[in-house]
Image (cartoon, helix red, strand yellow):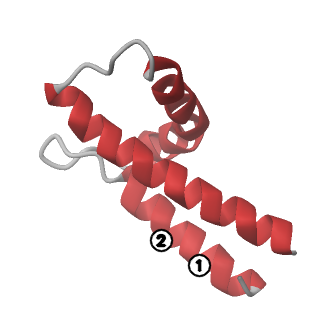
Amino acid sequence: MEIVCLAFAVYYVILLARIILSWATMVWSPPPAIAPAVRVIYDLTEPVMGLFRRYIPPLGGMDLSPIFIFLILGFIQRAIGC
């Protein structure tokens, strides 16, 4: 059970990093040295975010899917006792 809780916590941090990177890359292009890490973060989060984007339209150009992902992650964590 601890591994599952740790996986949820790690995914939470990765999702938060994705949000920060999406804002940062609007005004800044990542240097080539960290571009692979940025790509990994996007690759890890896009399947879940893409699923939510199909059902939750952007509101005023803002992607609301991470909010719902955080809510569902929190609900699942509480349900399994993390």
Amino acid, disc 1: Phe
Which of the 4 image quarters holds residue 8? bottom right
**Residue denoted by label 2:** 71
Residue 68's place in the image compared with 56, above or below, is below
Quarter of the figure with residue 6: bottom right
Label 2 sits on what residue type? Leu
| Residue appearing at x 60%, y 36% in the figure | 44
Q: Residue at x 43, y 62 (%)?
A: 68
23 left or right of 50 in image = left
Mark 1: which secondary structure? helix
Which of the two residues, 21 or 56, is positioned nearer the viewer here?
A: 21
Q: Residue furthest top?
A: 32
Give residue 75's mark.
1
**Disc 2 vs disc 1: Cβ atoms closer than 8 Å?**
yes
Q: Position of residue 78 (x, y in %)?
A: 65, 85
Seen from this angle, which residue lies furthest right?
A: 1
| Residue 55 in picture, x, y percent from top left | 44, 47
73 and 56: which one is in front? 73
The N terminus, quarter of image: bottom right
Q: Is residue 70 above or below residue 35?
A: below
Would you call the spot at circle 2 few (<14 residues within 10 Å), some (14-19), or many (20 or more)?
few
| Residue 36 locus on image (x, y percent) | 52, 19
Image quadrant assignment for residue 77: bottom right
Left or right, residue 72 beside residue 24: right
